[in-house]
Image: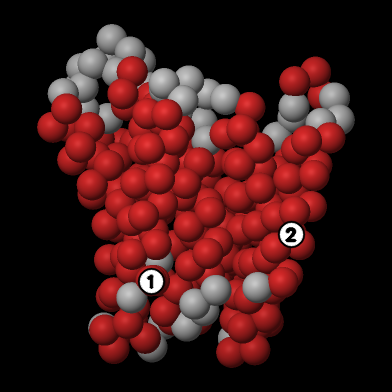
Amino acid sequence: MNKFLFPALAVVLGVIIALATKNKKTWNTKLLLSFSGAFLLALTLFELLPEVYNHLETKRTGLYIMCGIILQIVLELFSKGAEHGHVHIHKNETNFPWLLFISLCIHSFLEGFPIHEHNDMIYGVLIHKIPIAALISMFLFQSNYSKLQIVSFLLVFAIMTPLGTFISNTWETFADYAHIINAIVIGIFFHISTTILFESGEGHKFNLSKFISIILGVAVAYMI
């Protein structure tokens, strides 16, 4: 049951963080984002990657992973990088951000599929979604969108990952392509997590706090 509840809980926690920080980006949010990126990347390497290479031909596996990376790049043309913490919503904007909404929903839907056979991945998705949901909530709360639009955005965003997990558990058609879908999702996770980890810091300076967060993320993922 946790595999359905945790992704939705992550969005709820993100909203709470946004409200508690009064809708302002904080140092702690940035560290959580770094931790989540390292945790997701490490868990993908430890859990998902060996599995797909055991079930698919090596070169095809690499091709599917590259397809996932390319798919995520295409999604980010519309989301502007919201999946890894870059949310750009103009405060005076009143038109609903459909492109952002749809791209985030597709991303969230796909990341629910690996949870079917890899229950530990639920923790990677949980940790990944909390800071993303917090940052998205911060920008939504500062926008001129109606409360109904904001609630609808967050509600649908919250249920997309459990929906992906539910379909991967119940639809036999998708079960036949589970490893291919997982390989594509690996590409998505690779792109998101590495973007979080390797984006330049302010002034290209070494950030000890961020480095420690990354090491902790890898260590926790290894011990799961």
Q: Is residue 80 above or below residue 37?
A: above
Residue 210 as seen in the image, left or right of residue 32:
right
Vertical position of residue 103 compared to residue 85: above or below: below
Residue 68 visible at all: no
Position in image of residue 18 (x %, y %): 41, 31
Q: State the residue at coordinates (74%, 59%).
A: 218
Residue 221 is left or right of residue 114, and the answer is: right
Q: Nearer the viewer, residue 102 or 3?
A: 3
Q: Is residue 216 above or below residue 54?
A: above
- Residue on which the image places disc 1: 2
- What amino acid does circle 1 point to? Asn
Q: Nearer the viewer, residue 203 or 65?
A: 203
Q: CB atoms at circles 1 and 2 under 8 Å apart?
A: no
Q: Tell us which disc is closer to us: 1 or 2.
A: 1
Q: Secondary structure at mark 1?
A: helix
- Residue at numbered disc 2: 218
